[in-house]
């Protein structure tokens, strides 16, 4: 394969050893381990218009003992790393974590504890983009070889479940370690010396197909050589790979031994971090992300709100979380699916967004959305007392008023709002584009508004609290000359009335 690694500059590499690199999802923060004077510590560098700034120690996590091998969830709130011989651990090297609170402060690092950590060696972890699944390396009992890759899934109460061996499609009777799960959730890169390769440890990728990891493929020569290749990190866009090696890229990267974080082959040689363009054959699946900022529609001030992501293609919830102190939240969206987003806060009308990515193969840039929540109107006001709220995840069959199943989650959220606020009265508004006659469009918009009205009545909302109205093509919010504009104009809304 084409392979032209380039040594990263002096802002990252020094005369000490740098290794185990990673980059934040937005591409603006570079984190790695530096081994200097017998101590392993975290360093980070921020990106500017001119490149990576001078790396600084991550002071809040560094100690006089070894810590390294970090993995960070896509939203940046969960930071898991390896530390060895800590009194809080179970023995040897263990996995520790710290979480960013909504206030922006980080919790004091703590051991993941049993059942993840044991008296054996646990290290080199990789957390999924949503922070719900953790892959790691261990020589614990019950594996298939000297070192295996294991994974654990987070329970509803926030604890981690019993680790599961990744199985014979990943692990061999020899050794596997350093898993890296790309944010696509379907591409697992790792080191192995048990699968067919060129030398000692080679790098491989396994793809998730129909819920099962497939037999891994060797990343090819000269990424892999007859030497020993170390851990690999691939950026969010799937364009660049990052790894560490001594002097000659692709040949025998230096690793540490014993109770060090990496714990592989013996070497005291100097290592630097390199980057390279990823060959097309080993790239992960395309993904994007959405960064959401929630504000008060009247004051424009940031709001800490509840965020819910829903997979419309599979009709199942994905994640519920809170925005941070800056009212922002980031979430990864693999392409090839359709998604709904809901933002909610007590005292406000909810807001919805839709991401139709089922037929999208590549996006030029991620979604960055400012959401403005409308305060609930006060009692005693007259006429219409809220601006219309678009129900972006209510769908109808083409040219019909038949609700599609994917609408259920959004309609149920509207039902919940009405249940929680029994004094609230709303009107359902229907709109169309300008394709067809005005009469037909008015009729279609009215029937669609009534379909939502009927759904809510059937669910248990009294008719006295509901009304509906069709506006046809008379109130466009976008240009009807484009497909995208017409799609925006075909919409259903609700509006609080007196």
Image (tube, rainbow, N blue to C red):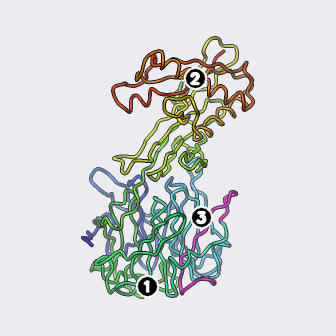
Q: Mark 1 points at which residue?
A: 193
CA neighbours of label 1 inside 10 A, class few (<14), some (14 to 19), many (20+): many
Structural distance between the alpha carbons of marks 1 and 3: 33 Å
Name the outermost residue toward the top.
382
Q: Which of marks 2 and 1 is in front?
A: 2
- Image location of residue 425, percent across then percent down: 68, 21
Q: Image quadrant for the C terminus?
A: top right
Instruction: Tell whether 208 sits left or right of 286.
Output: right
- Above or below, comparing residue 220 to residue 61 in the picture: below
Q: Any mark on residue 109, and which?
A: 3
Look at the image and give the residue range highlighted in magenta. Answer: 141-160
Structural distance between the alpha carbons of marks 2 and 1: 64 Å
- Above or below, comparing residue 54 to residue 225 in the picture: above
SS for dot 2: helix
Q: Mark 2 points at which residue?
A: 447
- Above or below, comparing residue 156 to residue 262 in the picture: above
User: In this orientation, does residue 302 appear?
Assistant: no
SS for dot 3: loop
Q: Nearer the viewer, mark 1 or mark 3?
A: 1
Contact between labelled residues 1 and 2, with CB atoms less than 8 Å apart = no
Of 275 and 128, nearer the camera is 128
User: In this orientation, does residue 315 appear?
Assistant: yes
Of 76 and 196, nearer the camera is 196
Residue at 62% of width from left, 73% of height from top?
Answer: 164
Q: Earlier in the sequence, mark 1 or mark 3?
A: 3
Instruction: Tell whether 470 sits left or right of 456.
Output: left
């Amino acid at each position: 394969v084409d392979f032209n690694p380039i040594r990263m500059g002096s802002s990252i590499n020094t005369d000490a050893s740098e290794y185990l690199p990673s980059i934040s999802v937005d591409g603006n923060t570079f984190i790695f381990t530096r081994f200097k004077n017998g101590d392993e510590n975290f360093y980070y560098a921020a990106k500017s218009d001119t490149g990576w700034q001078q790396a600084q120690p991550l002071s809040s996590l560094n100690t006089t003992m070894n810590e390294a091998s970090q993995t960070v969830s896509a939203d940046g709130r969960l930071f898991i790393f390896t530390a060895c011989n800590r009194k809080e651990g179970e023995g040897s090297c263990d996995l520790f974590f710290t979480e960013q609170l909504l206030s922006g402060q980080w919790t004091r690092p703590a051991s993941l504890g049993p059942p993840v950590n044991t008296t054996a060696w646990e290290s080199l972890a990789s957390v999924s983009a949503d922070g719900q699944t953790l892959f790691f390396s261990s020589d614990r009992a019950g594996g298939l070889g000297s070192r295996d890759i294991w994974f654990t899934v987070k329970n509803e109460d926030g604890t981690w479940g019993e680790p599961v061996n990744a199985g014979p499609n990943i692990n061999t009777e020899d050794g596997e370690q350093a898993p890296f799960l790309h944010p696509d959730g379907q591409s697992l890169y790792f080191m192995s010396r048990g699968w067919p390769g060129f030398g000692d440890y080679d790098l491989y990728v396994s793809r998730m197909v129909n819920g099962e990891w497939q037999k891994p493929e060797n990343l090819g020569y000269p990424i892999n050589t007859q030497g020993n290749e170390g851990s690999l990190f691939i950026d969010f866009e799937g364009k660049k790979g990052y790894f560490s090696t001594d002097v000659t890229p692709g040949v025998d990267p230096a690793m540490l031994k014993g109770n060090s974080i990496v714990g592989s082959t013996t070497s005291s040689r100097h290592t630097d971090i390199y980057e390279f363009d990823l060959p097309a054959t080993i790239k992960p699946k395309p993904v994007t992300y959405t960064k959401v900022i929630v504000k008060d529609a009247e004051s424009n001030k940031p709001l800490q709100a509840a965020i819910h992501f829903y997979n419309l293609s599979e009709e199942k919830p994905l994640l519920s979380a809170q925005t941070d102190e800056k009212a922002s939240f980031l979430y990864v969206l693999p392409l090839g699916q359709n998604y709904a987003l809901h933002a909610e806060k007590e005292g406000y009308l909810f807001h919805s967004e839709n991401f139709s990515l089922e037929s999208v193969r590549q996006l030029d840039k991620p979604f960055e959305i400012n959401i403005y929540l409308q305060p609930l109107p006060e009692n005693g006001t007259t006429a219409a007392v809220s601006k219309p709220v678009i129900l972006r995840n209510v769908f109808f069959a083409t040219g019909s008023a038949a609700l599609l199943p994917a609408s259920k989650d959004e309609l149920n959220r509207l039902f919940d709002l009405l249940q929680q606020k029994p004094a609230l009265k709303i009107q359902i508004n229907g709109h169309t584009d300008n394709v067809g006659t005005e009469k037909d469009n008015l009729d279609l918009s009215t029937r669609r508004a009534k379909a939502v009205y009927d759904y809510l009545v059937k669910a248990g909302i009294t008719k006295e609290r509901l009304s509906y109205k069709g506006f046809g093509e008379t109130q466009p919010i976008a240009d009807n000359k484009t497909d995208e504009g017409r799609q925006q104009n075909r919409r259903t809304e609700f509006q609080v009335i007196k």
